[in-house]
Image: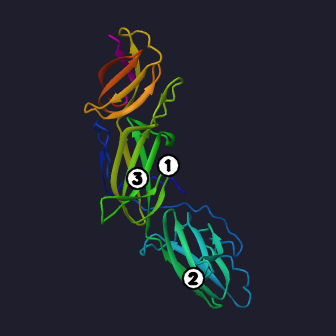
Amino acid sequence: MSRCKAVLLCASALLAAGGASAQSILSPTPAMPLQVPDTATPRAPGTGSTNRAEPPAPVEPGQGLVYLSATFTPADAQPVRAGIRWRVFEERAEADGSHKLVMQSDEAAPFFALPDGAYIVHAAFGLAGVTRRIVVNGQTTNERVILNAGGLSIIDVLGAAQLPSQKLQIQIYVPDRNGSEAKLIFANAKPKEVLGLPEGNYRIISTLLDTTGISGQTSTGNTTNSVVSADLRVQAGKVTEATLRHRAATMTLKLVNAPGGEALANTTFSVLTPGGDSIRELIGAFPSLVLAEGEYIAIARHDGKTFQTTFKVQSTLDRDVEVVAN
Protein backbone atom coordinates (compact mmCIF):
# COMPACT_ATOMS: atom_id res chain seq x y z
CA MET A 1 0.00 0.00 0.00
CA SER A 2 1.22 3.53 -0.70
CA ARG A 3 3.13 5.34 2.01
CA CYS A 4 1.21 8.54 1.39
CA LYS A 5 2.21 11.77 3.07
CA ALA A 6 -0.90 12.94 4.85
CA VAL A 7 -2.39 15.00 7.60
CA LEU A 8 -3.99 14.89 10.96
CA LEU A 9 -7.68 15.73 10.94
CA CYS A 10 -8.36 15.89 14.65
CA ALA A 11 -6.75 14.21 17.63
CA SER A 12 -5.96 14.49 21.31
CA ALA A 13 -3.30 12.56 23.14
CA LEU A 14 -2.31 11.50 26.63
CA LEU A 15 0.41 9.33 28.11
CA ALA A 16 0.02 6.65 30.73
CA ALA A 17 3.49 5.96 32.01
CA GLY A 18 3.24 3.81 35.13
CA GLY A 19 3.92 6.67 37.53
CA ALA A 20 5.91 8.86 35.16
CA SER A 21 4.36 11.68 33.19
CA ALA A 22 4.87 12.88 29.65
CA GLN A 23 3.02 14.41 26.76
CA SER A 24 2.12 13.54 23.18
CA ILE A 25 1.95 16.33 20.62
CA LEU A 26 -0.33 16.02 17.60
CA SER A 27 -0.35 18.99 15.23
CA PRO A 28 -3.44 19.41 12.99
CA THR A 29 -2.97 20.52 9.38
CA PRO A 30 -5.41 20.81 6.45
CA ALA A 31 -6.75 17.48 5.17
CA MET A 32 -5.62 16.02 1.86
CA PRO A 33 -7.26 13.40 -0.36
CA LEU A 34 -6.29 9.78 -0.02
CA GLN A 35 -4.42 8.81 -3.19
CA VAL A 36 -3.24 5.33 -4.08
CA PRO A 37 -0.85 5.09 -7.05
CA ASP A 38 -1.92 3.00 -10.02
CA THR A 39 0.50 0.07 -10.20
CA ALA A 40 -1.76 -2.30 -12.09
CA THR A 41 -1.07 -3.69 -15.57
CA PRO A 42 -3.66 -4.85 -18.13
CA ARG A 43 -4.64 -8.50 -17.94
CA ALA A 44 -6.91 -10.83 -19.83
CA PRO A 45 -10.65 -11.02 -19.03
CA GLY A 46 -11.31 -13.20 -16.03
CA THR A 47 -8.09 -12.21 -14.25
CA GLY A 48 -8.88 -8.52 -13.84
CA SER A 49 -7.84 -5.39 -15.71
CA THR A 50 -7.72 -1.64 -15.22
CA ASN A 51 -7.49 -0.94 -18.96
CA ARG A 52 -11.01 -0.77 -20.36
CA ALA A 53 -9.94 0.68 -23.66
CA GLU A 54 -9.11 -2.87 -24.74
CA PRO A 55 -12.30 -4.69 -25.84
CA PRO A 56 -12.86 -7.86 -23.80
CA ALA A 57 -12.89 -11.26 -25.47
CA PRO A 58 -16.37 -12.51 -26.49
CA VAL A 59 -18.21 -14.22 -23.66
CA GLU A 60 -19.78 -17.61 -24.07
CA PRO A 61 -23.56 -18.11 -24.28
CA GLY A 62 -25.13 -18.10 -20.83
CA GLN A 63 -22.51 -15.72 -19.47
CA GLY A 64 -22.38 -12.02 -18.73
CA LEU A 65 -19.49 -9.58 -18.41
CA VAL A 66 -19.21 -7.82 -15.06
CA TYR A 67 -17.10 -4.67 -14.59
CA LEU A 68 -16.20 -3.80 -10.98
CA SER A 69 -14.92 -0.53 -9.55
CA ALA A 70 -14.95 1.32 -6.24
CA THR A 71 -14.76 4.85 -4.85
CA PHE A 72 -13.83 6.03 -1.36
CA THR A 73 -16.90 8.31 -1.04
CA PRO A 74 -20.17 8.82 -2.96
CA ALA A 75 -18.87 12.19 -4.18
CA ASP A 76 -15.72 10.77 -5.81
CA ALA A 77 -15.78 10.95 -9.58
CA GLN A 78 -12.67 8.84 -10.11
CA PRO A 79 -12.48 5.21 -8.96
CA VAL A 80 -9.83 3.88 -6.59
CA ARG A 81 -6.75 3.02 -8.64
CA ALA A 82 -5.07 0.34 -6.49
CA GLY A 83 -5.04 -1.43 -3.14
CA ILE A 84 -8.37 -3.29 -3.45
CA ARG A 85 -8.89 -7.04 -3.09
CA TRP A 86 -11.99 -8.27 -4.95
CA ARG A 87 -13.71 -11.59 -4.30
CA VAL A 88 -16.79 -12.98 -6.04
CA PHE A 89 -18.79 -15.77 -4.37
CA GLU A 90 -21.79 -17.79 -5.44
CA GLU A 91 -24.87 -16.56 -3.60
CA ARG A 92 -26.07 -20.10 -3.01
CA ALA A 93 -24.57 -21.48 0.17
CA GLU A 94 -22.85 -24.85 0.39
CA ALA A 95 -24.03 -27.56 2.77
CA ASP A 96 -21.72 -26.24 5.49
CA GLY A 97 -23.06 -22.70 5.09
CA SER A 98 -20.03 -21.34 3.23
CA HIS A 99 -20.11 -19.69 -0.19
CA LYS A 100 -17.98 -20.93 -3.06
CA LEU A 101 -15.30 -18.51 -4.25
CA VAL A 102 -15.72 -18.01 -8.01
CA MET A 103 -13.29 -15.22 -8.90
CA GLN A 104 -10.80 -12.95 -7.16
CA SER A 105 -8.53 -10.11 -8.24
CA ASP A 106 -6.12 -7.53 -6.83
CA GLU A 107 -6.72 -5.20 -9.77
CA ALA A 108 -8.44 -1.92 -9.01
CA ALA A 109 -11.12 -2.31 -11.68
CA PRO A 110 -11.35 -5.94 -12.83
CA PHE A 111 -13.87 -7.48 -15.18
CA PHE A 112 -15.11 -11.07 -15.10
CA ALA A 113 -17.05 -13.29 -17.47
CA LEU A 114 -19.51 -15.11 -15.18
CA PRO A 115 -22.23 -17.68 -15.83
CA ASP A 116 -25.75 -16.35 -15.40
CA GLY A 117 -26.86 -16.36 -11.80
CA ALA A 118 -26.66 -14.48 -8.50
CA TYR A 119 -23.36 -13.63 -6.82
CA ILE A 120 -21.95 -11.85 -3.77
CA VAL A 121 -19.16 -9.37 -4.50
CA HIS A 122 -16.84 -8.28 -1.70
CA ALA A 123 -14.33 -5.42 -2.03
CA ALA A 124 -11.68 -4.97 0.68
CA PHE A 125 -9.40 -1.95 1.15
CA GLY A 126 -7.25 -2.72 4.17
CA LEU A 127 -9.68 -3.30 7.04
CA ALA A 128 -12.49 -1.52 5.19
CA GLY A 129 -14.86 -3.65 3.14
CA VAL A 130 -18.20 -3.61 1.40
CA THR A 131 -20.46 -6.39 0.05
CA ARG A 132 -22.81 -6.19 -2.93
CA ARG A 133 -25.25 -8.70 -4.41
CA ILE A 134 -25.28 -8.83 -8.20
CA VAL A 135 -27.27 -10.78 -10.77
CA VAL A 136 -25.73 -11.84 -14.10
CA ASN A 137 -28.23 -12.39 -16.93
CA GLY A 138 -26.19 -12.45 -20.11
CA GLN A 139 -25.72 -8.68 -20.22
CA THR A 140 -22.74 -6.44 -19.51
CA THR A 141 -23.00 -5.10 -15.97
CA ASN A 142 -21.11 -2.22 -14.36
CA GLU A 143 -20.98 -2.37 -10.56
CA ARG A 144 -19.41 0.46 -8.57
CA VAL A 145 -19.25 0.15 -4.78
CA ILE A 146 -18.59 2.84 -2.19
CA LEU A 147 -15.94 1.86 0.35
CA ASN A 148 -16.57 4.76 2.76
CA ALA A 149 -12.93 4.38 3.77
CA GLY A 150 -9.92 6.51 4.57
CA GLY A 151 -6.28 6.00 5.49
CA LEU A 152 -4.31 6.19 8.73
CA SER A 153 -0.54 6.69 8.92
CA ILE A 154 1.26 6.66 12.28
CA ILE A 155 4.67 8.16 13.04
CA ASP A 156 6.36 7.71 16.43
CA VAL A 157 9.28 9.89 17.46
CA LEU A 158 11.66 10.11 20.41
CA GLY A 159 13.19 13.55 20.52
CA ALA A 160 14.01 14.43 16.90
CA ALA A 161 14.44 10.80 15.78
CA GLN A 162 11.73 8.70 14.18
CA LEU A 163 11.37 5.34 15.92
CA PRO A 164 11.71 2.17 13.81
CA SER A 165 9.07 -0.55 13.82
CA GLN A 166 11.17 -3.01 15.87
CA LYS A 167 11.08 -0.58 18.80
CA LEU A 168 7.30 -0.15 18.78
CA GLN A 169 4.08 -1.98 19.44
CA ILE A 170 1.24 -0.01 17.83
CA GLN A 171 -2.33 -1.09 18.54
CA ILE A 172 -5.50 0.36 17.01
CA TYR A 173 -8.86 0.16 18.78
CA VAL A 174 -12.45 1.07 17.96
CA PRO A 175 -14.19 2.72 20.94
CA ASP A 176 -17.36 1.00 22.16
CA ARG A 177 -20.24 3.45 22.42
CA ASN A 178 -22.06 1.22 24.89
CA GLY A 179 -19.20 0.55 27.28
CA SER A 180 -15.77 1.52 28.51
CA GLU A 181 -13.95 -1.25 26.62
CA ALA A 182 -12.59 -0.74 23.11
CA LYS A 183 -12.29 -3.43 20.44
CA LEU A 184 -8.79 -4.25 19.22
CA ILE A 185 -8.76 -4.32 15.41
CA PHE A 186 -5.02 -4.11 14.67
CA ALA A 187 -2.41 -5.52 17.03
CA ASN A 188 0.86 -4.54 15.36
CA ALA A 189 0.61 -1.65 12.92
CA LYS A 190 3.81 -0.52 11.18
CA PRO A 191 5.04 3.09 11.37
CA LYS A 192 4.26 5.20 8.29
CA GLU A 193 2.27 2.39 6.68
CA VAL A 194 -1.04 3.73 5.35
CA LEU A 195 -3.80 1.50 6.72
CA GLY A 196 -7.18 1.39 5.00
CA LEU A 197 -9.91 1.84 7.61
CA PRO A 198 -13.67 2.45 7.58
CA GLU A 199 -14.61 6.03 8.34
CA GLY A 200 -14.95 6.50 12.09
CA ASN A 201 -13.30 7.14 15.45
CA TYR A 202 -10.23 5.22 16.59
CA ARG A 203 -7.80 5.04 19.50
CA ILE A 204 -4.10 4.44 18.91
CA ILE A 205 -1.91 3.04 21.69
CA SER A 206 1.82 3.08 21.02
CA THR A 207 4.19 1.28 23.40
CA LEU A 208 7.94 1.78 23.22
CA LEU A 209 9.76 -1.57 23.34
CA ASP A 210 13.01 -2.18 25.20
CA THR A 211 15.56 -3.48 22.66
CA THR A 212 18.74 -2.62 24.58
CA GLY A 213 19.81 -6.28 24.49
CA ILE A 214 23.00 -5.92 26.56
CA SER A 215 24.83 -9.23 26.97
CA GLY A 216 24.72 -10.79 30.43
CA GLN A 217 21.43 -9.27 31.59
CA THR A 218 17.98 -10.72 31.98
CA SER A 219 14.68 -8.93 32.52
CA THR A 220 10.97 -9.65 32.71
CA GLY A 221 9.45 -8.62 29.37
CA ASN A 222 10.50 -6.09 26.76
CA THR A 223 7.72 -3.51 26.99
CA THR A 224 8.46 -0.18 28.63
CA ASN A 225 6.27 2.20 30.60
CA SER A 226 6.45 4.75 27.77
CA VAL A 227 2.92 4.45 26.39
CA VAL A 228 1.34 7.14 24.23
CA SER A 229 -2.32 7.14 23.18
CA ALA A 230 -4.28 9.29 20.75
CA ASP A 231 -7.98 9.54 19.90
CA LEU A 232 -8.69 10.58 16.33
CA ARG A 233 -11.16 10.31 13.47
CA VAL A 234 -10.54 8.84 10.02
CA GLN A 235 -12.55 10.51 7.26
CA ALA A 236 -13.57 8.76 4.06
CA GLY A 237 -11.40 9.66 1.10
CA LYS A 238 -8.71 11.25 3.27
CA VAL A 239 -5.66 10.06 5.15
CA THR A 240 -4.89 10.97 8.75
CA GLU A 241 -1.26 11.18 9.82
CA ALA A 242 -0.75 10.97 13.59
CA THR A 243 2.64 11.86 15.07
CA LEU A 244 3.06 10.39 18.56
CA ARG A 245 5.91 11.71 20.70
CA HIS A 246 7.49 9.41 23.27
CA ARG A 247 9.50 10.93 26.12
CA ALA A 248 11.93 8.33 27.44
CA ALA A 249 15.61 7.42 27.83
CA THR A 250 17.85 4.39 28.41
CA MET A 251 19.16 3.95 31.96
CA THR A 252 22.08 1.63 32.81
CA LEU A 253 22.01 0.41 36.42
CA LYS A 254 25.18 -0.26 38.42
CA LEU A 255 25.91 -1.31 42.00
CA VAL A 256 29.28 0.18 43.01
CA ASN A 257 31.32 0.35 46.20
CA ALA A 258 32.08 4.04 45.55
CA PRO A 259 30.91 6.60 42.97
CA GLY A 260 32.54 5.90 39.62
CA GLY A 261 33.67 2.46 40.80
CA GLU A 262 33.46 -0.87 39.00
CA ALA A 263 30.00 -2.47 38.75
CA LEU A 264 29.45 -5.50 40.99
CA ALA A 265 28.38 -8.68 39.24
CA ASN A 266 25.50 -10.97 40.26
CA THR A 267 23.29 -8.08 41.31
CA THR A 268 19.49 -8.10 41.17
CA PHE A 269 17.86 -4.74 40.45
CA SER A 270 14.27 -3.59 40.96
CA VAL A 271 12.95 -0.34 39.51
CA LEU A 272 9.93 1.21 41.23
CA THR A 273 7.84 4.35 40.94
CA PRO A 274 7.82 6.75 43.92
CA GLY A 275 4.48 5.20 44.87
CA GLY A 276 6.02 1.72 45.07
CA ASP A 277 4.70 0.25 41.80
CA SER A 278 7.13 -2.20 40.22
CA ILE A 279 8.41 -1.32 36.76
CA ARG A 280 11.08 -3.92 35.96
CA GLU A 281 13.28 -6.62 37.52
CA LEU A 282 16.77 -7.09 36.06
CA ILE A 283 19.84 -9.18 36.85
CA GLY A 284 23.43 -8.40 35.89
CA ALA A 285 26.42 -6.19 36.52
CA PHE A 286 25.12 -3.27 34.46
CA PRO A 287 21.67 -4.01 32.97
CA SER A 288 19.93 -1.35 30.91
CA LEU A 289 16.27 -0.50 30.47
CA VAL A 290 14.16 2.15 28.76
CA LEU A 291 12.02 4.30 31.05
CA ALA A 292 9.51 7.06 30.49
CA GLU A 293 10.44 10.51 31.72
CA GLY A 294 9.89 10.84 35.48
CA GLU A 295 11.20 9.89 38.93
CA TYR A 296 12.09 6.35 40.05
CA ILE A 297 13.63 4.25 42.83
CA ALA A 298 16.37 1.72 42.07
CA ILE A 299 16.86 -1.14 44.55
CA ALA A 300 19.95 -3.36 44.28
CA ARG A 301 20.37 -6.74 46.05
CA HIS A 302 23.82 -8.30 46.35
CA ASP A 303 25.24 -10.92 48.74
CA GLY A 304 22.13 -10.78 50.92
CA LYS A 305 22.26 -7.00 51.32
CA THR A 306 19.91 -4.38 49.88
CA PHE A 307 20.78 -0.87 48.72
CA GLN A 308 18.73 1.80 46.98
CA THR A 309 18.77 5.24 45.38
CA THR A 310 16.36 7.60 43.67
CA PHE A 311 16.91 9.01 40.19
CA LYS A 312 15.23 11.04 37.47
CA VAL A 313 14.80 10.26 33.78
CA GLN A 314 14.92 13.07 31.22
CA SER A 315 13.77 12.35 27.70
CA THR A 316 16.56 11.31 25.26
CA LEU A 317 19.23 11.70 28.00
CA ASP A 318 20.72 8.18 28.28
CA ARG A 319 22.97 7.75 31.33
CA ASP A 320 24.24 5.48 34.12
CA VAL A 321 22.46 5.19 37.46
CA GLU A 322 24.80 4.21 40.27
CA VAL A 323 23.58 2.57 43.47
CA VAL A 324 26.32 2.93 46.08
CA ALA A 325 26.79 -0.06 48.42
CA ASN A 326 27.21 1.67 51.76
217 within the magenta span: no
Q: Please tell me whether mark 2 or mark 1 is closer to you in this view.
A: 1
Mark on residue 142?
Answer: 2
Q: Which residue is mark 3?
A: 241
- Total tally of numbered discs in the picture: 3
Which label sits on residue 190?
Answer: 1
**Secondary structure of the residue carrying numbered label 1:** loop
Q: Is residue 244 above or below residue 71?
A: above
Asked if residue 116 can be seen in this view, the reply is yes
Q: For residue 120, which quarter of the picture?
A: bottom right
Q: Which residues are magenta?
A: 316-326
Asked if the magenta segment contains residue 320, the reply would be: yes
Estimate the spatial distance between the alpha carbons at disc 3 and disc 1, rounded to whole Å: 13 Å
**Tag 3, which secondary structure?**
strand
What distance separates the C-alpha of mark 3 from that of mark 2? 34 Å
Tell me how far mark 2 sits from mark 1, CA to CA.
36 Å
* Disc 1: CA contacts within 10 A as few (<14), some (14-19) or many (>=20): some
Of the residues under marks 3 and 1, which one precedes in the sequence? 1
- Residue depicted at 70% across the width and 70% down the height: 43
- Is disc 2 in contact with disc 1, using a CB cutoff of under 8 Å? no
Q: Earlier in the sequence, mark 3 or mark 2?
A: 2
- Residue drawn 55% across and 81% down? 143
Local crowd at mark 3 within 10 Å, few (<14), some, or many (≥20)? Answer: many
- Front one among 324 and 10: 324
Residue 25, image x and y in percent? 31, 44
**Residue type, numbered disc 3:** Glu
